[in-house]
Amino acid sequence: MSAVGTLFRLQQLDTERDRLRARIKAIDGLLAGPAELRTTTAALQAAEKAVRMASAAASTIKDEHTALDNKRAASEQRLYSGSVKIPKELQDLQREIESLAERTRLLEERQLTGMLEEEAAEAARAAAAAAQAQCAAAWQLAAAALRTEREACDARISAVAAERTLLTPQVSPIHLTLYEQVRTAKNGVAITRMLEGSCGACGIAPSATRIQEARNNPDPVKCGNCGRILYAA
Ligand SMILES: [Zn+2]
């Protein structure tokens, strides 16, 4: 292969590697999951938190209820035990029992509201879970395809790198430096194939002399217009 031919192959490999890297970056972005999945997952987490909070509130009310029941039972036991004989004390005890009964009634109202809230939170959680599961199932297929594609990209990058490693020593250091410089300056494309007598990159036809040089010169010849190396094979 001519020196320029080898550079052209190098360009093909580098272009492919650039494309593969860009695709891998895009796949990694896509693998973060679609916005809909993130939204439904966040909604499910919020619904789960609401269920935990409603359940904790119900548990607190239940404890309060038990405490009130115990207190009232103790007071009633004292009242009916006959140990309290002073009328004023008996009256106070009676009032305390009534007060405890009223507090229990109010607490039971809160308990009922709490149960309804707990049921509503649980229903919301079930709906959020169903929506999230549907979204996750659809995403699973897409994600599997993306992971397979990513593996293929990785494998191809390795193959490209291996061929590049074999090719690079065949290029003179001066030509390699020129290639890298032009590639950096020209948006990744240092060398272009001639198409029907014109530069394949900018479309301008070089002079007949320059085309002749590009064909026969062992050193790279650049397009007079865009400055890329011409490959005239
Ligand atoms: Zn050109």
Image (spheres, rainbow, N blue to C red):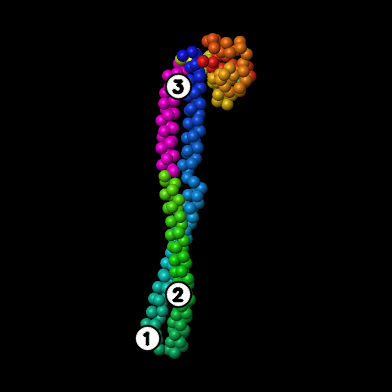
User: Mark 2 sits on what residue?
Assistant: 108
Q: Earlier in the sequence, mark 3 or mark 1?
A: 1
Where residue 58 sits in the image (x, y, percent)? 44, 67
Classify residue 207 as left or right of residue 176.
right
User: Mark 1 sits on what residue?
Assistant: 80
Residue at 49% from the left image edge and 40% from the top image edge: 29
Please determine whether, in this image, residue 50 is positioned above or below residue 162.
below
Query: Mark 2 falls on what kind of element?
Result: helix
Front label number (2 vs 1): 2
Q: Earlier in the sequence, mark 2 or mark 1?
A: 1
Q: Magenta stretch: give its range.
A: 142-169
User: Can residue 53 be seen by looking at this rendering?
Assistant: no
Query: Mark 3 falls on what kind of element?
Result: helix
Q: CA distance from mark 2 to mark 1?
A: 26 Å
Name the amino acid type tagged 2: Glu
Please determine whether, in this image, residue 71 is positioned above or below residue 84.
above
Name the amino acid type tagged 3: Arg
Q: Which mark is residue 164?
A: 3
Q: Are marks 3 and 1 in contact (CB under 8 Å)?
A: no
Front label number (2 vs 3): 3
